[in-house]
Image (cartoon, helix red, strand yellow):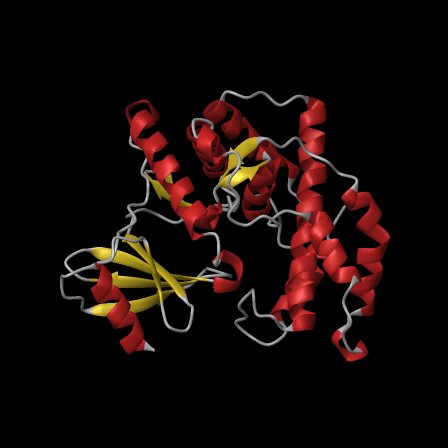
Amino acid sequence: MRTDREKIIKSYIDEPFTEIKKLSGGHINDTFLVEAHGYYVLQRLDKRLYTGSLKEIEHNYLQYRKACEKLNSDMNEWLCPEWIRNREGSFFYTGNDGDIWRMYCYVEGDIFIEKNNASGIYEVGRGLGRLHCILNECADIRDLYTFRHLHDIDFYCKKYLDLKVPYMKRNEALDRVILDRMKEMREISVPAGSVIHGDAKCANMVFKGGKVVCFIDTDTIMPGSVYDDLADCARSCCIDEKGNLDRERLAGMLKGYEAGSGKRFTMPDRELLIRNIEKNKFVLGLRYYIDHMLEEGYFTEQYSGQREEKAVKLLSSIL
């Protein structure tokens, strides 16, 4: 496997590399840090999700990069990941096994870990607001989807209801929660028509000097609702150890978002966001539970049963 990665790396860069180290944190794609004269990130995209969408991913990335370059002077050193083209002139390398790879320059920065720090939560929100200002300039992205069912509750509810799996694979308590809350969750509707990151969690943000300066994993940039980006963001920094929403953290995040985006949230807006956070927890919990039962392996596990465990935590904490 290492030999295969070395071949792929050599298709992107000429300089000798000294180390290939797996980076943790991703649940879908495999990510490696490559040390050469500089540092690079090599990433294997899940072919089940992105095969057939490479043109859309490239188009949306280039539109985002163009918007970053245009607004960079106003956005105070906002960074865009620099994707590298291989010897064939493509951003993507597809192996004989169908695996899809891409490489980009490593973005130096810090990782957000201070969830109990009010200023840190504020900056998370402000960074997302700044990102949405840039994405608002990407009009050509509004009709190009890279992952059509990412926040699609109807799609995953149907997949769940159509499941035919052995009894021992099921969790009766989870099934009760899902069936009890499904109708209510499906009735939650948020305004669409924006361009969003699609996976706006803190792990996809790069910080410098305590401020967000970059978003990585831009494959999911596509049309959607800002409420879904806000929900993903809040789920990564405003949920306590028991899986419950911390409203004080959420208020701080929204204050930062308003500062970064110029948007103002009315009380009904805030209540809709809270409901959408619960809806997105429901969707993600469904996805983990389905993955657990079907053993599709969309989400990686660090230990056996982790997918079911995450499904339990997400679904049992819904308000």
Can you give x and y, in whole percent of width and height, for residue 56 in the image?
A: 45, 46
Q: Quadrant of residue 304?
A: bottom right
| Front position in the image: 252 or 227 | 227
Camera-side residue of 111 and 83: 83
> Which quadrant of the figure contains the N terminus?
bottom left
Comparing 252 with 42, the one in front is: 42
Residue 112 visible to an observer of this rendering: no
Q: Is residue 89 visible?
A: yes
- State whether residue 169 is above or below residue 254: below
Write the residue at 70% across / 48% down. 153
Residue 6: quarter of image = bottom left
In the image, residue 46 above or below residue 247? below
* Residue 246 quadrant: top right
Instruction: Say whether residue 319 is left or right of residue 102.
Output: right
Give the side of residue 205 with respect to residue 311, left or right.
left
Q: Is residue 49 above or below residue 193?
A: below
Residue 34: x and y in percent read 26, 63
Give the total number of marks visible in the rendering: 0
Residue shown at the point (54%, 42%) measured from the top left: 233
* Image side of residue 150 versus residue 98, left or right: right
Using the image, determine if residue 68 lies above or below residue 103: above
- Residue sitting at x 44%, y 49%: 219
Q: Position of residue 13 (x, y in %)?
A: 19, 59
Looking at the picture, how far across and down is residue 149, in whole percent? Answer: 62, 50
The residue depicted at 18 percent of the width and 69 percent of the height is 18
